[in-house]
Image (cartoon, coloured by chain):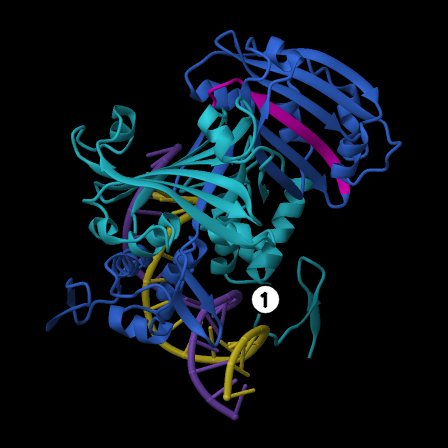
Chain colours: A blue, B cyan, C yellow, D purple
Amino acid sequence: MTASQDILGRDRASGGERGLSWRDIRDDVKRRINERVWQPGDLLPNEEEMAREFGCARATVNRALRDLADAGLLVRKRRAGTRVAAFPVSKATLSIPILRLEIEELGAEYRHALLGRTVTRPPPDIAAELDAPAGEPMLHVRALHFADGRPHVYEDRWIDLRGAPRARDVDFSAKNANEWLVQNAPYTRGSLALSAANASAEEAELLRTQEGEALFIVERTTWSGDVPVTRVRLAYRPGHRLRTHL
Amino acid sequence: MTASQDILGRDRASGGERGLSWRDIRDDVKRRINERVWQPGDLLPNEEEMAREFGCARATVNRALRDLADAGLLVRKRRAGTRVAAFPVSKATLSIPILRLEIEELGAEYRHALLGRTVTRPPPDIAAELDAPAGEPMLHVRALHFADGRPHVYEDRWIDLRGAPRARDVDFSAKNANEWLVQNAPYTRGSLALSAANASAEEAELLRTQEGEALFIVERTTWSGDVPVTRVRLAYRPGHRLRTHL
DNA sequence: AAGTGGTCTAGACCACACC
DNA sequence: GTGTGGTCTAGACCACTTC
């Protein structure tokens, strides 16, 4: 049996069947981009050629390059080939767990308080955001979520009873609306907006801070097909950071 | 030639080779979860069985289920099988382009102004965040980015000259630091934090707003291996929203 | 020990974009 | 038309986890 080396310098028996893993290839391509062997805008060899160079199947190269393209490092087009992105876009994935888990993962004790529950017509901006008829009454739920007894998030939520009819009969003082909806009102699409806002007098009092303090705001709206499900505005206590890695 | 129907009710010629696409399978599984055929926590059939049901190769089922697991809808473990996530985590992908493109995509004209460029020792919190020696001098760059002549973002950036040595000789009044670094100082890992802060007097003046206004803050730190590259704090003008979909 | 997902292979055809 | 990535297949072996 003769021995050979693949492009990464690994010894491979010539009779060996299994080549490099797609992670190996991904990492090597990433390295070449970082070391500027392939510069922004450069055209990479096609998949077949890379498969030959790496000594693996084309599907393996495809998996590796697809991964890098998903990460924003490569731009792939049929016929045009694969290029290093001219401006590699940082893509960060925000995982947004239910509030209880978010707080418990901080090592804090979770508690919530229902502040209000009414069925009423939402203000026009809320109805418009949900693409709902203006006159449609919705369930309006307001709650405060605590971490170790301190107010952590103020939740202001509108629930469309057509998208989540069973919500009408749920006791949201026992099970919070956030958690109930995640498990019982699946959505097919949603929008998310992150911003900053000065605390109103009411928000300041609830979050035990001063009026005007900068609050981190998360607004989420979800639909099931074309039917609105829910729209929520979360106001976090001052100093809160949403962290992730790149 | 006889005809049969696959599980989705499509007619398939019995001699036909090609089954459903992984997207078809993904969508059908997603539909069953939304319609609560499979409920949170439920165990799904294994890949081989699903491949038989769908009339496709196991690899195709794998691709579909892997996609749903990446999206947070399924939890997959070897030997234990595939389950519907008990608390489907919303995962949102934030694409963070360079500031010029972000502004141009709003349909606005981009311009930037260099406010300052010095080589000095960073304050302790910056050095700590970067895991850099406290005494190490860094390049400190401050700039304002305009959209249609209005201040849009205030950028306060520290550049570690060990991670990006060539930055010392770049004219950041011609090419902004954000763009230059993206193309010339690749990183292997980074952290991102989103928060809210009240505008300082200086920030208010630069962004042409009032002191105390709530500003949306993005802080990004990147390293190349263990070497710090850069740390930037972006303060957006009041009202800015970072949007994405779920 | 056994069952599950994870991955790789070799080959094939397809879809799209550019010519 | 032609070249590229996109996907599917059938089979195989592996890695991990639970039994």
Residue A167 at x, y = what percent? 75, 24
Magenta residues?
A227-240
Report how many numbered discs are placed on residues in the image.
Answer: 1
Q: Position of residue A209 (x, y in %)?
A: 55, 10
Q: Residue at x 72, y 60 (%)?
A: B9
**What residue is shown at x 63% (from left), y 32% (from top)?**
A219
Identify whether B25 is placed above or below A57.
above
Q: Relative to residue B122, is residue A107 depicted above or below?
A: above
Q: Nearer the viewer, residue A224 or B28?
A: A224
Task: Return the residue nearer the eye: A202 or A74.
Answer: A202
What's the amino acid at mark 1?
Gly
Q: Tell me if A236 is positioned left or right of B178 in this view.
A: right
| Chain of the residue that carries numbered disc 1 in the rendered image | B
The verdict on residue A229 being magenta is yes
- In this orientation, which residue lies closer to the viewer: B215 or A51? B215
Label 1 environment density (alpha carbons within 10 Å; few <14, some 14–19, many ≥20): some
Where residue B169 sits in the image (x, y, percent)?
23, 53
Q: Quadrant of residue B114?
A: top left
Q: Secondary structure at mark 1?
A: loop
Relative to residue B244, is residue B105 depicted above or below?
below
Q: Locate the C terminus of chain A and report the quarter of the image it occupies.
A: top left
Quarter of the image with the N terminus of chain A is bottom left
Query: Mark 1 = which residue?
Result: B19
Q: Residue furthest left?
A: A2
Instruction: Please give the name of the residue rendered at 28% of the width and 55% of the height, measured from the top-left corner.
Output: A27
Residue B103 in sight: yes
Q: Point out residue A155 in the picture as x, y percentages from the top left corner.
A: 64, 21
Residue B132: say if magenta: no
Residue at 29 percent of width and 66 percent of height: A38
The kind of secondary structure the magenta stretch mainly shows is strand
Examine the rendering and report whether any part of residue A1 can be seen.
no
Q: Please state which of residues B150 and A122 is positioned toward the viewer in this rendering.
A: B150
